[in-house]
Amino acid sequence: MSNELENTYRRALRWYPKRWRAANEDAVVGTLLEFAEADHRTEPAGGELANLHRNGLGARVGIVGQWISPAARAYASIFAVGLGASISAAGILVACWTYQYANHVYQQVLSVDALLQNLSAGQATYVFWLIAFVACMLGFRRVAGLLLLASIPVSIGWSAIAFSLGDYGHPSDVSLGFLSLLAIVAASGLISSSRRSRKLQFSAFVGFALLLAGAFWLRGYGGGYWGNGARNVDYFWAPLAVWLVFVGLPLALTVGIVLWRSHRRGEAIGVLYAAAPLLPLALLAFGWVNGVPTAAEVLTSIVVVVALGIGILRIFGLRIRITRV
Amino acid sequence: MREPTFFVLASLADGRKHGYGIIKDAEELSDGRIHLKVGTLYAALDRLQSEGLVVAAGDEVVAGRLRRYFELTEDGASTLQAESERQALNARRANDRLKKRAARVALKPVIAR
């Protein structure tokens, strides 16, 4: 068998990742040459090289997928679906209130007319998220995944058009980045539509909705800014960003680091993957209305982070022990 | 389970095999319908290994070439068993319906008369 054929095969295998090649190249080349010998060929068979190229690319993508296990992606997705859907529900409510207060029509809690007349790229994104959440609850996980992924080009495209037309009624790049990353995390882990996963998604939605309601109760969303208690969409993201950045990110980092040091790398990557969409919000939190959050908020957040961190670590069966060295 | 995966697992059911052996065996088991390309086979083996259904079972060098052997795990055997039973059940149900159809077709001329 000619060395030339072997070299051709080895060249084709460069499409595979280096780590994969180190483990498998000789075995694959051996199999390819065995077939060539049986067929009395001195050249690759039709479609053989294209097949290697395609599978090589697939292995590269697969390795990225292997970094985050399906279980980790599924749990990150539950977190993302709950968070995204609750934010969308709250976002739509606040958008309607903004319209109603602006137009002095206070009697309605939620008006479809108000939503349609006030429809922007941001609200369109929320609508995508809410329909995707309903699809999740009904067990249509593929439809939900498609809707979540479709929300990204729709929101970015719509915002770009609005921006180019000089319309300010579009989401900021920070909220677009956050919701887009959240949609990717949510869609990438919609692996199961079992009753248990739907229950967890719903629980996450209710949990985050309660947090958002708490922010409303504390006169968030601009409630403390105007005398009449009106909420404004312009202030919608501020309390969210503060909570998510000062509670969510440190919590995820703490849990992720402890899991990593306990050699539970898959779970650590899963936790950090779930928290990745929160990163863009850090920019918004620090640029929050005339400066950074108050010391009281930061201190409260630290206490909540520590308490939640200890609780979550106990769920994973880990305990923090401080020892004197 | 897709048909090529089924035949890869079926090929390993009677003992360990190397890449060339699996492809030839899968072709024979499927009456020539399934001819896996080498790249496709190794992609399937990667996936089956990560799912714990197949494991590498030693390397041998024959005529200067590396042969890597693979074998079915207990999980792989039970997955194959479950899939075989599912397919057998499907085939039995389809056959029952076909028998009923054949009986109905056979009765038709009698009823018409």
Image (cartoon, coloured by chain):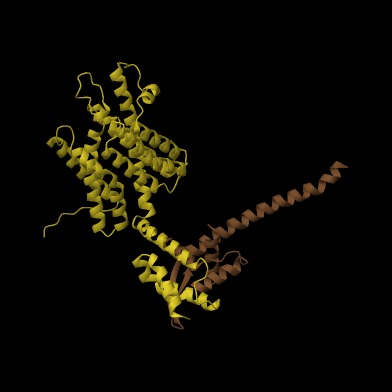
Q: Tell me, what hue is chain A?
A: yellow
Question: Is residue B15 among the parts visible in the rendering?
Answer: no
Q: Furthest residue to the bottom?
A: B63
> Where in the figure is residue A50, as x and y percent of width and height?
47, 64
Q: Which residue is more in the foreground, B87 or A100?
A: A100
Q: Residue at (36%, 46%) from the top-left corner?
A: A184
User: In the rendered image of this protein, does residue B90 appear above or below residue B39?
Assistant: above
Return the x and y of residue A314 as percentages of the image width and height: 27, 49
Q: Which residue is farthest front?
A: A165
| Residue in the foreground of this view, choosing between B3 and A47 | A47
To which quarter of the image does residue A202 belong?
Answer: top left
Q: Colour of chain B?
A: brown
Residue A260 in sight: yes
Residue at point 42% right, 68% down?
A12
Q: Is residue A315 above or below residue B43?
A: above
Residue drawn 44% across the image and 74% down it = A29
Position of A63 compared to B28: left or right?
left
| Quadrant occupied by the C terminus of chain A | bottom left
Residue B18, percent across and down? 49, 74
The answer to whether A73 is drawn above or below residue A112 in the figure is: below
* Residue sitting at the far left: A325
Q: Is residue B72 above or below residue A218?
A: below
Instruction: Give the percent coordinates (x, y) of residue A253.
Output: 23, 49
Residue A177 occupies which quadrant of the picture? Answer: top left
